[in-house]
Image (tube, rainbow, N blue to C red):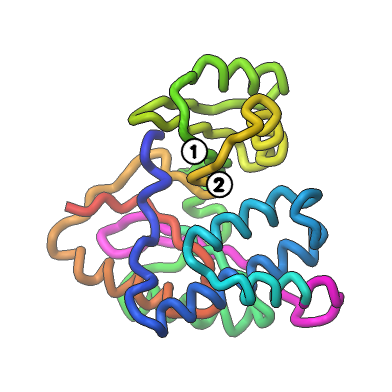
Amino acid sequence: MGRAYQNRKESMAKTSDAKAKVYSKYGRVIYVCAKEGGVDPDGNLTLRGLIERAKKDQVPTHVIEKAIKKAEGGGGEDFSVARYEGYGPGGCMVIVDCLTDNPNRTFGDVRQCFTKTKCKIGTEGSVSHMFDHSTILVFKGDDEDAALEALMEADVDVTDIESEDGKISVFSPHTEYGKTKNALIAAFPDIEFEVDEIQFLPKNSSPISDDAVEMFDKFLEMLNDLDDVQNVYHTAELP
């Protein structure tokens, strides 16, 4: 599984417009998380992780606070999760996660990204079986055995654990997120997570040809330009 979590987005903050999109995406997902799970980060571990990640990505505090206050008010938009699957440039498998207040619009926008790059959007379940829906927690440390013991004592279903370059990476099913994080916090009170996310990790990568790289980049750019798109996961292995 290794560094698979590194294989997504890294290039969205190149311009002020791109930064605004990043802020908007964080604001939306924080709002939804706080509305569904509560506005107190101490009682909503997912929200706490989102806030920490947003701060690391230099999202202004006022953006975070505005989203939480909006959720606290109980009003606002009615966003829902929408997930689309298909085949991208070079035949790679793709999952597109969205938050939308208009599923018909979002589906049309995402489908256009596929069709304009000569790709095919699929049905639910068409490619997701080729990904693991995983909790990923990475923190500084080198005592892999102590971390694994703490997780085992908490009855966490650990799928993988690695220690490399002074960092420990823990992988578990997405349904074990809270249990995994609580076990590590209890075992290491001063822990600071460098990665704290739930992602789709490809079980296998798909090398794509040099000829498909330009179209693949265009495909990702088009998807990332959509306000409703939160994350894009893929199996592509670039040359």
Above or below for 87 versus 229: above
Above or below for 182 versus 237: above
**In the drawing, what numbered circle is on residue 159?**
none
User: Which residues, given as a range, are shown in magenta?
Assistant: 70-94
**Residue extending furthest toward the front:** 190
Quadrant placement of the N terminus:
top left
Closer to the camera in the image, 133 or 154: 154
Does the stretch in magenta take in 87? Answer: yes
Residue 64, quarter of the rendered image:
bottom right
The Cα atoms of the two marked residues, 2 and 1, are separated by 7 Å
Which amino acid, by three-letter code, is at mark 1?
A: Val
State the SS at label 2: strand
Closer to the camera in the image, 143 or 37: 143
Image point 61% across, 37% down: which residue? 173
- Percent position of residue 175, x then y: 68, 40
Answer yes or no: do the residues labelled 2 and 1 have beta carbons within 8 Å? yes
**In the drawing, what numbered circle is on residue 138?**
1
State the SS at label 1: strand
Residue 53, quarter of the rendered image:
bottom right
The residue where tag 2 is placed is 196
- Percent position of residue 163, x then y: 41, 25
Q: How many marks?
A: 2
Image point 49% across, 38% down: which residue? 138
- Percent position of residue 83, x then y: 58, 63
Does the stretch in magenta take in 65? Answer: no
Q: Is residue 204 left or right of residue 122?
A: left
**Residue extending furthest toward the left:** 210
First in sequence: mark 2 vs mark 1: 1
Image point 76% across, 63% down: which residue? 34
Which amino acid, by three-letter code, is at mark 2?
A: Asp
Callout 1 environment at 10 Å: few (<14), some (14 to 19), or many (20+)? many
